[in-house]
Amino acid sequence: MKKSIFFLILGIMFLGQRTYGQKFGYIDTEFITSKMPEYQKVQEVLNEKTKAWIKEVTDKQALVVQMEKEYHLEELLLTDELRQQKLAAIKAKDLELKSFQERVFGDEGELFKAKQNAMKPILDEISKALERVVRQKRLDFVFDKANDGLALIYTNPIHDYSDYVLEELGLELDPNLKK
């Protein structure tokens, strides 16, 4: 008797999961983009820009090194005032170099912005294709495994419980902002 009740409960749970289960999926955007010719072109353009910026940084570094060499060769022959002027000029060039590196290669630098702008059409194309696949396969959630672990990139809005949490917190949602 106990076995039959156990199997009955197990069967109900199994059937309940099958009929009410949410469908999950994942994609690998790195793999997808590697197969896209547009991505290859974007990478080539970005590589050319990066090479040009690296050359500019190298040239600026070489200038600072050259200025330091010249200073050390002349140091004993210079007056205190000229030494201070040369050191200030070297420091200014070094600060200019560091500022350039930050402006180009920093977190919000030109390279980052160029990559973002170049990748936007490609990612939009992937997003549209993903929307079609989600509808065809009736998926509720899609993850992207390409970047540092899994990132949730699509959710079916019927599974958004944010409004209920706001309600539990005693906060009201502005009726003009309803989803």
Image: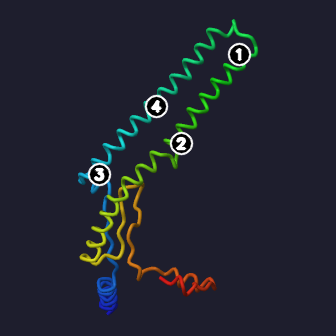
Q: How is the image coloured?
A: rainbow
Q: Name the disc covering residue 39, or none.
A: 3
Q: CA distance from mark 3 to mark 2?
A: 25 Å
> Going from the N terminus, do you reach mark 3 or mark 1 first?
3
Q: CA distance from mark 1 to mark 4?
A: 27 Å
Q: Quadrant of the N terminus?
A: bottom left
- Between residue 128 and residue 34, name the one nearer to us: 128
Q: Amino acid at mark 2?
A: Arg
Q: Name the disc covering residue 56, or none.
A: 4
Q: Are marks 4 and 3 in contact (CB under 8 Å)?
A: no
Q: Name the disc covering residue 133, or none.
A: none
> Going from the N terminus, do you reach mark 3 or mark 2 first?
3
Q: CA distance from mark 4 to mark 3?
A: 26 Å
- Look at the picture and state if 79 lies above or below 167: above
Left or right side of 118 for 88: right
Residue 158 position within the rendered picture, expressed as x and y whole percent measured from the top left: 41, 83
Q: Residues within 10 Å of mark 3 (few under 14, many from 20)?
A: some
| Residue at the spot of label 1 | 83
Q: CA distance from mark 4 to mark 2?
A: 13 Å
Q: Amino acid at mark 1?
A: Arg
> Going from the N terminus, do you reach mark 4 or mark 3 first?
3
Q: Name the disc covering residue 103, or none.
A: 2
Q: Residues within 10 Å of mark 1 (few under 14, many from 20)?
A: some
**SS at mark 2?**
helix
Q: Are marks 3 and 1 in contact (CB under 8 Å)?
A: no
